[in-house]
Amino acid sequence: MKTVYLDNAATTAVDPEVLAAMRPYFTEKYGNPSEFHILGREARIAIENARNKTALFLGAQPEEIVFTGSATESINLSHKGLIESLLEDFRGKKRPHIITSSIEHKAVLETCRHLERRGEVFVTYLPVDNFGRVDVNKIKEVIKPETVLVSVMYANNEVGTIEPIQKIGFIIKKINNSMRNNRIYFHTDATQALQYFNCNVDLLGVDFLSFTGHKIYAPKGIGALFVRRGTPIVRQLDGGEQESGLRSSTENVPYIVGLGKAIEIIKRSKTFNSEKIAKFRDKLIKGILTIPGVRLTGHPTERVPHIASFVVDGVEGESMVLLLSDLGIIASSGSACTSAKLTPSHVLTAIGVSPEVSHGSLRFSLGKDTKDQEIDYVIKKLLEVVGRLRRMAPKF
């Protein structure tokens, strides 16, 4: 049976070029980059080459790039590290204020809730419209004298909606240039956007930008954080002085090399892949919407090229995923980070989908190797699967 893999928003296969670049650093160039001997220097050069590639891609300086173990770790470092660095300035005053959206990745939401539980911050969770878009004017309305951080994702991992990051960055810059006692820092989670959109940090106006390798054809277990020069931050892993003192732990040299290679490939092929994938996505959406009782979730046009997400009336998402899997089609119901739970998706709830309907969520996420004939196969088989499940559900 052939496999049609349409779960690239959850994770991607390691690109053969990435694997080839990594391989020598497991068995031949395996030195500890903190050592001064030839193997250590070789490993250090490899890390700095990857750092330079990442910085160039983001329009940043190499010293502004911190390699981490994941986007989740990057987010914890940026949010907790910033707040910890500012607590002394707020002693005896109101707590620092964070603004974020209600559809952020759990890494952002749970980090903010952790800081709330500790009594270190108060947080505003912005609502979104029915497409999952943050209203820029709402951000302006809720900014307070104590606001120190705005955190809004570049593109949603579940429904694919693109957020107006550049506009938010412009507003924050304008406010920071006014008479304020403290600066507002701006973070975006660019995990689902990195390989498709301009992530120049100056263009976006961000002080922090986080992403992970395994969504861009690098391995799991490697991520990065852009930290704008001069941004206050305290490391969250204590130990040595690796990563400019911001991330203690011996660097994962092969994976860092792999991340650098993946970014190099994105830079080389972004436009072609984006246009091709968007074309296949639109064909998939058009075909699936011919099935009665199916609704597209997320913005109809302002969405990433690779994500097509739906809710299907009268059908459980998990059942669709299992039956599709039996037919060789790999998809997901909700995001990979929350799909193990039976509670309704927080993203679908935020955009106004009822809990009953949200249980029929289905997400297809395309990749650089997706083929036209695979789209035809998915449309045909999904129609059969939905029909079969509805016949088994007497209430539909």
Image (cartoon, helix red, strand yellow):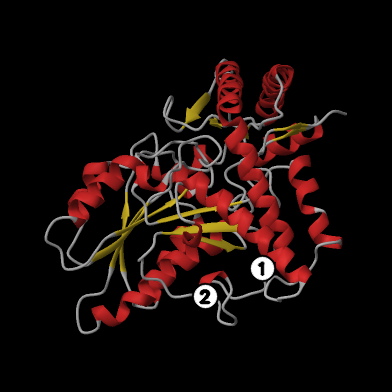
Checking the image for residue 245, the label placed there is 2
User: Closer to the camera, 113 or 343?
Assistant: 113
Judged from the image, the secondary structure of the residue bearing numbered disc 2 is helix
Residue at 58% across / 37% down in the picture?
267
Residue at 68% across / 20% down in the picture?
375
Q: Which residue is mark 1?
A: 251
Disc 1 crowd rating (10 Å Cα; few below 14, some 14-19, many 20+) is: many
Where is residue 362? Give x, y as percent: 60, 35
Say if 33 sits above or below 322 in the image. below
Say if 264 sits above or below 176 in the image. above
Q: Amino acid at mark 2?
A: Gly
Image quarter in which the C terminus is found: top right
> Is 367 on the left-hand or right-hand side of 196?
right
> Is 203 on the left-hand or right-hand side of 55?
left
User: Closer to the camera, 180 or 330?
Assistant: 180
Q: CA distance from mark 1 to mark 2?
A: 12 Å
